[in-house]
Amino acid sequence: DAKTTQPNSMESNEEEPVHLPCNHSTISGTDYIHWYRQLPSQGPEYVIHGLTSNVNNRMASLAIAEDRKSSTLILHRATLRDAAVYYCILRDRGSGGGADGLTFGKGTHLIIQP
Amino acid sequence: SAVISQKPSRDICQRGTSLTIQCQVDSQVTMMFWYRQQPGQSLTLIATANQGSEATYESGFVIDKFPISRPNLTFSTLTVSNMSPEDSSIYLCSVHLASEQFFGPGTRLTVL
């Protein structure tokens, strides 16, 4: 699996936007960019994923660079509940059937200040 | 979506004993995955369990240490055998449905 690089930690204030970066310079043309987060004492949960175009859902937005070598997860208005470890993961389109598990890096520990 | 439950939620065990962790999913799924999360670390995939066949183990994990059962499409067990303190971790099961991976709440294991 192609490798991703994320900052170890980031800090933000409640009710402000948060931009979580991820570098994936060795991404292949068939890799989807997935984001998961792990809240304290819980299993990871899906946040968003995309291939080339920017994506929005009720949880977040995903901005993907034109060359696809980096992406940014955007939380538009952070709350205390968004404090978690955020993982950026590449998944080959061929794994869409779910035959392969996810490969987790160290992720970014997001701290939200009230 | 998929709802996953695990039993037990936590346990404290003695060195040399074994613990079997159960994972139940509310949907029928082909693949189930078992992960380990050591203290302060990220998740590491242990094995993939396909119903009706032997599990496939990742590098560094072996069947004798982590035997897995997959008797049907909604259930799996992971056994941590002959435990040592280094096995103290959170063990999570996971399934893939509709482009998402869903995770159970985890089993927190402490080995004394």
Image (cartoon, rainbow, N blue to C red):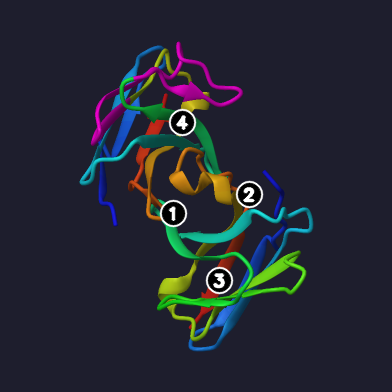
Residue at horizontal 29%, vertical 57%? B1
Q: CA distance from mark 4 to mark 3?
A: 26 Å
Q: Earlier in the sequence, mark 2 or mark 3?
A: 2
Residues tagged by mark 1 and mark 2 found on one chain of the structure? yes
Q: Which residues are magenta?
A: B53-77
Is residue B42 visible in the rendered structure shown here?
Answer: no
Real-space Cα distance between discs 2 and 4?
A: 20 Å
In space, the residues marked 2 and 3 are separated at their CA atoms by 18 Å
Q: Is residue B21 rendered to the left or right of residue A8? A: left
Residue A57 visible, this angle? yes
- Describe residue A40's horizontal placement relative to residue A67 as left or right: left
| Magenta stretch: helix, strand or loop mostly | loop
Q: Which residue is mark 2?
A: A105
The quadrant in which residue A17 appears is bottom right
User: Mark 4 — residue?
Assistant: B88
Is residue B83 placed above or below B2 in the rendered structure?
A: above
Q: Tag 3 or tag 1, which sits nearer the N-term?
A: 1
Q: Which residue is mark 3?
A: A111
Q: From the viewer's perspective, is B105 left or right of B73?
A: right
Identify the residue shown where x is 23% and y is 45%. B27
Spot occupied by residue A73 in the image (x, y as percentages of width and height): 59, 73
